[in-house]
Structure formats: structure tokens, C-alpha cells
Amino acid sequence: MVRLALLAAFVVTAACGGDDGAVSDASHDGPELDAQGFPPAPALGAPIDRMGRPAINTVLNSLFEPNATKKAAKRDAYNHAIDPDGWPMATLDSTAVPATRVLGEFSAYLGILDSVDTGHPDVPGAAVNGCGNAPAYAAPATSASYAALAGVLADDQLYVDTARSQCDRYLAVELNAVLTVPYTSCGGRTLTHDVIDSSYSLLFAGAGGFSSALAPRIGDGAGAHTDVNNLMFPFLGAPH
């Protein structure tokens, strides 16, 4: 028993290292440590996805592209773009002549989606013609009519006004930018925002897609989750 106790003490002592507990450059094979004894952060690899405004890459990039491989490649190219300053002119398809870029792709699909609200009973004026009511639309209809909105959406970041204490409306800051709609919400995105309904209302009908309280008038028909909470951990419900 005494021999076993001594052996155990020896193993623990050998494993613990020196008495001061310090880690020197000679005692490890990893990267150099900083003054606090932490290794540097690992280098980031190439981006594989980004999540700014949900559904934008889906509905404005290759929505009606019949070739599934090309569609996937163009959407991947959108996600892989690194520099935010270059997002509007990022190349989606280098094999096209001229090359397909984000701004042109978005503008083309915005023109298609602008007509979707035609005949919608809840959108003012759309019962006759839903075309031309997209945000920042520039008449007459040309290839540049949707360029302003395409540029805003290509800047795929969520904007938050930190001077606002309420955050109950998705896209509040963007709506103010393209429609000069007064707002009291901070914008951004919370778990309880119906981001798809807000996105559809903006793309299909512009200002007419929202009530005076900025509630979306056009929806996808999917009910909201009832097991999410913005304030209490764990925020999300059980997997299902």
C-alpha cells in the first residue's frame, strides 16, 4: 500500500509540472503565447455562408434558373463574397457574357417580384396594377428602375439604431432609408420577427405592403412559432 501511494504521488507530481504552474515557450509545441498566456486566434478560412437578411439570396438570385447546378453555384458565390464594399458588384456567374453580378441579378428579379401583389386586396392600389410600387422605383420602366433598391439589399447587413429602445419591427431602419417611413423601432432582427412576411411585403408592394404600424400585409401563410422567447434563456423551444 505504501509503494502504491508513493507511485501515485510520483505520477501526479510528474503530470503537474513545476511548482509555479507557469507555461514557458520551451514547455509546449504550439504557437507563441501572448502576455496572458493565451495562444493567438486561429486564422479564418474562406466564408461558406452569411446571414444578413433572410430570403434575399433565395428570391433575388437565380430564383427561376432551371439548371440546379448553376443555381447552387450562383448562390454559393453570393455567400462566399468577402468584402462588403464589393458586394453589389460581386460576380455570381463568370461564364456568362457579360458576367452576372449581384446588382444586375437583384434588379432583374425585383422587376418580376414587383408585379406579384397585382390584385392583392390588402395592398392599396394593387387591385389594378401592382407594378411600379416597389421601394425606390424609378419610372419609366428601364433596366435601372430597381437599381436603388438592389443596391440597398446587396448591402446584406442588419442595421440597428441603438438610439431606439424598442425592437419590434424587422427592417425598420431599411424602410426608413428607402421609403422615408418614420420609425420608432431599432430594426435588427429578433427571434419573434416574421422576417419572411416583412420581406415579401417590402419586395412585392413597397410602402403599400405595410400598415401604418409597419405590420406586413403580405405573408407566406406559415404560422409563427409559439416556443421562442426574446428575453428568457434558452430562447428557443425544444427541437421538433
Image (cartoon, grey):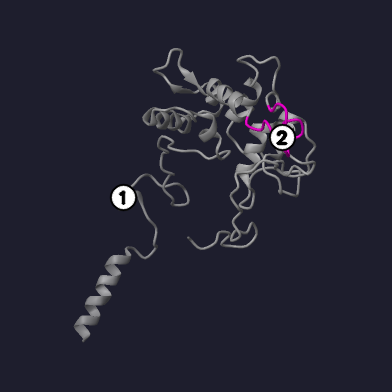
Residue occupied by mark 2: 175
Dot 1, how many residues are within 10 Å of its Cα: few (below 14), some (14-19), or many (20+)?
Answer: few
Q: Which residues are magenta?
A: 116-130
Residue extending furthest toward the left: 3
* Magenta-span inclusion, residue 207: no
Disc 2 residue type (three-letter): Leu
Q: Nearer the viewer, residue 85 or 59?
A: 59
Measured as percent of width and height from the top left, residue 43 is found at 41, 39
Helix, strand or loop for disc 2: helix
Q: Is residue 127 left or right of residue 233?
A: right
Mark 1, mark 2: which one is toward the viewer? 2
Q: Earlier in the sequence, mark 1 or mark 2?
A: 1
> How far apart, in angstroms, are the residues tagged by discs 1 and 2?
58 Å
Measured as percent of width and height from the top left, residue 3 is found at 19, 82
Q: From the viewer's perspective, is residue 183 above or below residue 126?
A: below
User: In which image quadrant can residue 87 be found?
Assistant: top right
Disc 1 residue type (three-letter): Ala
Residue occupied by mark 1: 26
Q: From the viewer's perspective, is residue 71 above or below residue 161?
A: above
Q: Nearer the viewer, residue 100 or 232?
A: 100
Measured as percent of width and height from the top left, residue 119 is found at 69, 33
Screen quadrant of the N terminus: bottom left
User: In which image quadrant can residue 162 be found?
Assistant: top right
At x 58%, y 38%, the residue is 53
Task: Tell me the number on the disc at residue 196.
Answer: none
Q: Is residue 100 left or right of residue 85?
A: left
Helix, strand or loop for disc 1: helix
Q: Is residue 52 left or right of residue 175?
A: left
Residue extending furthest toward the bottom: 1
